[in-house]
Image (spheres, grey):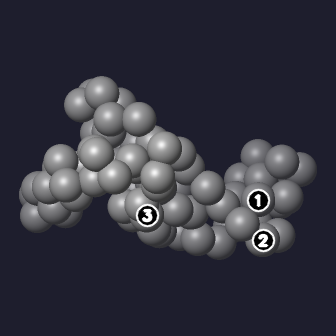
Amino acid sequence: MNEIKLFSSTDDILISQVCEILKENNIPFIKKQEGSGAYVGVLFGSTIGIKDIYVSEEDYEKAKELIKVFKNN
């Protein structure tokens, strides 16, 4: 799968909402976090830093439109 970054945020709630929208629309995604923030999440159950959501090239346009609608509401 060729992945394209769809969305980035430091807000865990916002990331969860975007993931839920993608799940509801049957769009597979990968959530990534790099750096020390990922390790803090493993140790303490909470993450810091930027989280990225990636989707396939095939799903990117549909996912982008769904996120656009979400952000405008």
> Where does label 2 land, which residue?
35
> In terms of sequence position, does the residue under pointer 3 or pointer 1 come before the other?
3
Given the image, on which type of amino acid does mark 3 rest? Lys
Check disc 1 and report its element: helix, strand or loop: helix
Horizontal side of residue 44 vs 67, given as left or right: right
Quick one: quadrant of the C terminus? Answer: bottom left
Q: Residues within 10 Å of mark 3 (few under 14, many from 20)?
A: some
Kindly indicate whether the residue at mark 2 contacts the one at mark 1 (C-beta within 8 angstroms).
Answer: yes
Could you tell me if residue 52 is visible in this image?
Answer: yes
Q: In 3D space, how far apart are the residues under numbered discs 3 and 1 (Cα atoms)?
A: 18 Å
Residue at the spot of label 1: 38
Q: Residue at x 52, y 62 (%)?
A: 52
| Residue in front for this viewpoint, 67 or 57 | 57
User: Which amino acid type corresponds to the residue marked 2 in the rendered image?
Assistant: Gly
Please say if 15 is above or below 72: above
Crowd class of label 2 (few under 14; some 14 to 19; many from 20; radius 10 Å): few
Instruction: Determine whether the residue tagged by mark 2 lies in a helix, strand or loop.
Output: loop
Question: What secondary structure is marked by label 3?
Answer: strand
